[in-house]
Image (spheres, coloured by chain):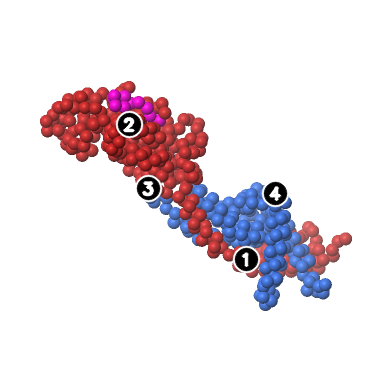
Amino acid sequence: MKDTMEPCRVIEPELVALAGGEASAAGAARVEAHVARCGSCRDALSRYRELEGELGELRATAPPGADPTLARAELAQRLADLRSRLVGYGVYPSPLGPILIARSELGVSMVEYLEPGTDPRRAGLGKLAGTDAVEAREVTEPLYRDVLDYLAGRRTDLGWPLDLRWTRSDFQRQVLEATARLPYGAVTSYAGIAREIGQPHATRAVAQALRHNPVPIVVPCHRVIGSSGALTGYAGKRVDLKRQLLAVEGVRADARIDRAAMYVRYLHESAYCMPTCGALPTEPLSNLTLFGRRERAEAAGLVPCSDCRPDLHPLPPI
Amino acid sequence: MGSEMDDDGFEAIMTAHHAEIHRYLARVTARSTDADDLSQETFLRAYRAWRGLPADANRRAWLFTIATNLCKNHFRGESRRRRALAAAVHEAAREASSWPESEALAREAHARVERVVATLPFKQRLAFVMRKLHGLEYDEIGANLECSGESARAHVFQALKKIRRGLDELAPAQTEPVR
């Protein structure tokens, strides 16, 4: 049974549009002409207009019981929590192959060499337990540009704040910090780092700690080599990357570095020497820091040894 | 590099839009506790992505999109939706009965509309609230509901039609004695 009060079906959308202020001029004219002769539509139009009035008031009021104040305060807390867990990452091409750079609000938390086609979430990011990783090129892009400058030799220090909350132990953190102090263009041995942190017998543990360095390049574990001068490992089996990074810094290496072709600093002396100075040729590598170039030793704040005078008799350039 | 992680911009987004998104969610879920949670979730999701947003993006419309998607997930499954609505209508009625009489009179008109809105089918309710209470464009609404702007307009029309009829049915209380 048709309700006699119902408006005509064909015109109703236009009634609604007119009441809501959305009708075209032609539509409005059609409605005006129609309601002039149709009582139920006239009636419906006025009810739609009333309803629009109600909606206007409703727009200005919150629904019953809904107060956003508490939710907003709680949101501030949840947001602070999210910020502390959030790690933004980007994957970029580089001369060393695709690399992933990730940072939190505190600093850079991960640099990783990716095999082409690796899903970054399945790679190292998964090791950052409790984090929430999102792709965020806008915060990692400037870091990427720094890396490119570094790899092109235009920059010797990345100078990034680091977020090392995901290191495995205090020991690993000490190893990373000691490694980070190695000057640009210098190399030492795992045993040297062990000695540096006051645990001279922990050579293997140092090597393990650096194997799991979450931020290679930034913490320059490529500057740490075996006691024999062999490059040993890097990023799994990527010794080629280690060689490339050392070459950028002026350190030449094939399977091993050539001690006889490098300047030497003994322990914490303030001078650097020729490799032949005094008893240096027989010193274990763990007591030495080696430099491929004089400028690098001097940039690290060292002065030429007054006995062997590396400034007067430099090594032949490599 | 500190400046790149600055969150002032996001604070501004929250200040500008949280209350409105909360209100939107309270209406479409018809439960204020759901609105609390979903509005927070909306902004947490937004935070994860807002830096990648183009400079000229309409942030308000974008937040409505996130909120609407969360809402759809929240109410996935017709049975759950019905249960939630039944509870909400019950709650609204209980709240209404606890209002002081003068206030009740003033609020009655609003409350009747709210009650009918709460019984609308889900998509119509979303479309109606976005259009008539928050003034979003039909195209934006269509994008949020995965339909055309024209379909969004049709949803809003159907909603208004039902609300008008619903109010007509509630109105006789004034003309007929209640038993």
Q: Count up the numbered dots.
A: 4
Query: Tag 2, which secondary structure?
Result: helix
Numbered disc 4: what chain?
B
- Part of the protein shown in magenta: A226-235
Where is mark 2, residue-wise? A203
For residue A231: magenta?
A: yes
- Position in image of residue A97 (x %, y %): 42, 31
Q: Is residue B144 left or right of residue A233?
A: right
Amino acid tagged 2: Thr
Work out which residue is located at the far right of the displayed protein and give it.
Answer: A1
Mark 2 vs mark 1, CA separation in Å: 65 Å
For badge 4, the amino acid type reads Gly
> Which one is closest to the eye, mark 1 or mark 3?
1
On whether disc 1 and disc 3 are found on a single subunit, the reply is no
Instruction: Identify the residue at the far left of this view.
Output: A307
Query: Which numbered disc, 2 or 1, marks the residue that appears first in the sequence?
Result: 1
Dominant secondary structure (helix, strand or loop) of the stretch shown in magenta: loop
Disc 4 to disc 3, C-alpha distance? 46 Å
Tell me, for residue B1, which label it has, or none.
Answer: 3
- Residue bearing the label numbered 4: B77
Q: Nearer the viewer, residue A128 or A38?
A: A128
Q: Which residue is mark 1?
A: A65
Task: For chain B, give the colour.
Answer: blue
Circles 3 and 2 on the same subunit: no
In terms of secondary structure, where does tag 4 sit? loop
Asked whether residue B155 appears in the rendered view, the answer is: no
Most foreground residue, A172 or A300? A172
- Along the horizontal axis of the image, is A111 left or right of A262? right
Q: For the residue carrying disc 4, how many other residues have a C-alpha within 10 Å: few (<14), some (14-19), or many (20+)?
A: few
